[in-house]
Amino acid sequence: MSVDQRKSALKKVYWTERDAIGLAMVSDSDLSAAYVSVNEVKTVTIHAVKKDENFVATTGTGSGGIRMGESPSIPEEFHDALADYAIAKGYETKPQLLNNAIYFKNNFREAINEAKKYANKGRDGSGYHIRQYDY
Amino acid sequence: MTQQQLIETVKQHHPEMGETQIRIYLNKALDEFCRKTRVLNTLYTFPTVADQRYYDLSDDIIEITRVDYDGYEIPRLVGKPEKTDVS
């Protein structure tokens, strides 16, 4: 890549608004604004944290959700946690078995804590760091 | 575990619960799990269109961690441009 390409790219900024990403570039010629819309065709790559697809009632394989015979994309070791959540919800409707609800909800929370470590740990075995963020 | 296996696991504790209800709970669990752990990462690529300012984001995105323009990381603007362009 040329130096000009690098210089041009580094004049761009992004922000998010109304479920969309905005792209603009530093204005060199238009003195009425600090940023103007991008006027060229280039490739943009968004690195993102994403949700998994939803479970759907369909059988077989294909796109459009996690079908009956398919598994979620989260690591296999955390699949149990999804059942724990549903089991806890079921016990919440049975007042005499509320302790069971607490037990399974705690299992789900523990899995979340383990998965946070998993997500922040390098696959080369390097130490993990916890990013700060609001809940 | 497949969805079928997850449903059967739940039914061992709650045989009276319907599959639709179980699926609702599994979807809530999966959403909460992904949102809180940020364990799934991905890349989305698209070409810019001349003079277009906004591009719709996929509903799957929880958080943008980085944006590359023409192969280079670009900064996030604090706030929004003062001159509005809704294109």
Image (spheres, coloured by chain):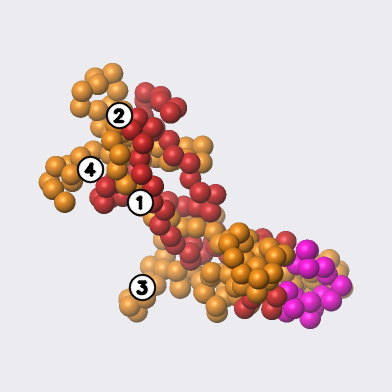
Q: Colour of chain A?
A: orange
* Circles 2 and 4 on the same chain: yes
Could you say where residue A90 lies in the image, as x and y percent from the top left?
Answer: 79, 69
| Residue found at the very far left of the displayed protein | A3
Is A62 left, or right, of A132 in this rendering? right
Q: Distance between the residues labelled 2 and 1?
A: 20 Å
Q: Mark 2 points at which residue?
A: A35
* Principal secondary structure, stretch drawn in magenta: helix
Note whether residue A85 is visible: no
Residue under label 4:
A10
User: What subunit carries mark 4?
Assistant: A
- Whole-angstrom CA distance, mark 3 to mark 4, is 28 Å
Task: Report the span colored magenta.
Answer: B7-23
Residue denoted by label 3: A122
Give how far apart the Cα atoms at labels 4 and 1 are.
14 Å
**Nearest to N terminus: mark 3 or mark 1:** 1
Q: Circle 1 sits on which residue?
A: A45
Judging from the image, mark 1 belongs to the subunit labelled A
Q: Which amino acid does label 4 sit on?
A: Leu
Q: Do labels 3 and 1 share a chain?
A: yes
